[in-house]
Image (spheres, rainbow, N blue to C red):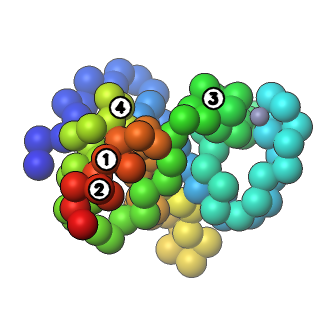
Amino acid sequence: MTDSHSTKSGTRGDKDAVFALSRPSRCFGCDSKLLVDDIVRLEEKPDEKEVYCLKCSGLEDFEVLKAGNAQITRLAKKHSSRHFVILKWSELWKTYERFGLLVERQALQKAREQSS
Ligand SMILES: [Zn+2]
């Protein structure tokens, strides 16, 4: 498991992370309604967090792969040119928990074909 080298400088937010909403919201870019567990990208602004849907983030070809199936996860990562860790805020623990991965749709399809 030698995932990503941590070369992030300065910013606290992980650039390769996206977020599953823990409460409904609206996209800052296109104003579309976002529901709980929708995947979004967050931009930290000085006084607030701006929420962007996958479309506005250029990630509409990506799909959610929930954590739990190690084989599919491994294959999907292999086939996807890039992937993002999905984090979800836990009100209970006041921390971010791992929700799954965001991978390219075709990569996920391939992974499912190969694992069955
Ligand atoms: Zn949007």
* Disc 1 and disc 4 in contact, CB within 8 angstroms: no
The residue labelled by disc 4 is 82
N-terminal of the pair, mark 3 or mark 1, is: 3
* Of labels 1 and 4, the one closer to you: 1
Q: Amino acid at mark 3?
A: Ser
| SS at badge 3 | loop
The span from disc 2 to disc 4 (Cα, nearest Å) is 19 Å
Q: Amino acid at mark 2?
A: Glu
Q: Is 108 placed left or right of 45 in the picture?
A: left
| Residue at the (59%, 56%) spot, across then down | 20
Residue identifier under label 1: 110
Q: Badge 4, how many Cα within 10 Å: few under 14, some, many 20+?
A: some
Residue 83 is left or right of residue 23, and the answer is left
10 Å crowding of disc 1: few (<14), some (14-19), many (20+): some
User: Ligand 1: does it lie within 8 Å of the C-beta at label 3?
Assistant: yes
Q: Quadrant of residue 82?
A: top left
Picture residue at 48% right of the left edge, 36% below the top: 13
Cα distance, mark 4 to mark 3? 14 Å
Query: Of the residues shown, which amino acid type is indicated by label 4?
Result: Arg
Please determine whether, in this image, residue 94 is positioned above or below residue 10: below
Local packing at callout 2 (Cα closer than 10 Å; few below 14, some 14-19, many 20+) is few
